[in-house]
Every structure is written in C-alpha cells, then in structure tokens.
Amino acid sequence: MPAKDEKQPITPEMLEMMKAMKSIFVDEEDEARKKEERELRAKERDAKARQNAIDRETEQQRMAAKKAIQESCLHQREDNTYNLHGQRGCDGQVRFMCPLCLAQFVPGHPQYNDLIRRVSSERLGNARQV
C-alpha cells in the first residue's frame, strides 16, 4: 500500500472514468460558444497588435519628419536675426523655442550655449519671468 504522500499513477481506466465524468457536467454548446469567444478575442488581440504596430511606425515617421524640419530650420528671420522666443525660468535659465519649427532649446541642448552667445543681451533682458 502506498504512503499517504505518494500519488498513484493514473491508469487508462481512471482516465476513461474522468473523461466520462467530465462529459456529464460539460455542456457541448457552452464549450463551443466559449471556443468561439476565445477565437474572437484572439482575432481582436491580433488586430489591435497590428494597429499598434502601424501606429508606432506612423509615429516614428512623424518624429523623423519633425526632426528633419528642425535640423533644416535656421531659426532666423529674413533679416538674419534669430526668431527665437525665450522665457527665463525661476532657476534663472532661459529656455528658447523656435516658432517656425517648434524646436525647444533648454540648458543641456547641444545648440543652447551657442544660442545664448548669439542672441542679443537685450532680448534676454526682455524674456518673461516665470
């Protein structure tokens, strides 16, 4: 006789008996409906995943186009003066934005120090305090 903790192996007769017991309690129509619902959810999940992939690709294309526009923008008016709008923050740093390409220049941006030197000091003095 096996010990209490040991499990007895499932015999083919026991397997047949378990299948017969399951068939008593399982409704065939209910199982078919559940299977259709699972398949429908799987199709919806796949469609949503495809749409998300398309959305990510579209967003990447949009960001690439925005970056190309910003890189080609000179941030200048026709009279070669900078067309940047600045705002001095509470930390004393000036943050710029180009209204043509919507590029933002904050401390740490590669072009920020160059812009600070080039934009006239009077423009910096007129920047709004936040």
Image (spheres, rainbow, N blue to C red):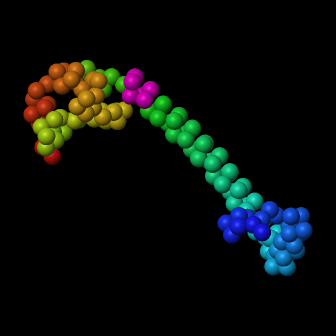
Where is 32 relative to 41, above or below?
below
Q: Nearer the viewer, residue 86 or 9?
A: 9
- Quarter of the image with the N terminus is bottom right
Q: Nearer the viewer, residue 36 or 75?
A: 36
Position of 31 compared to 48: left or right? right
Q: Residue at x 14, y 31 (%)?
A: 123
Position of 36 compared to 130: left or right? right
Q: Residue at x 63, y 52 (%)?
A: 48
Residue 127 at x, y = what percent? Answer: 14, 37
Residue 56 at x, y = what percent? Answer: 55, 41
Displayed quadrant of residue 79: top left
Residue 105 at x, y = what percent? Answer: 27, 32
Q: Which residues are magenta?
A: 67-72
From this viewpoint, which residue is outermost toward the front?
A: 1
Q: Residue at x 25, y 20 (%)?
A: 80
Q: Residue at x 51, y 36 (%)?
A: 60
Q: Is residue 110 visible?
A: yes
Q: Which SS type dominates the magenta stretch?
A: helix
Where is 19 relative to 54, above or below?
below
Displayed quadrant of residue 13: bottom right
Residue 8 at x, y = what percent? Answer: 77, 65
Magenta segment includes 69? yes
Where is 4 relative to 126, above or below?
below
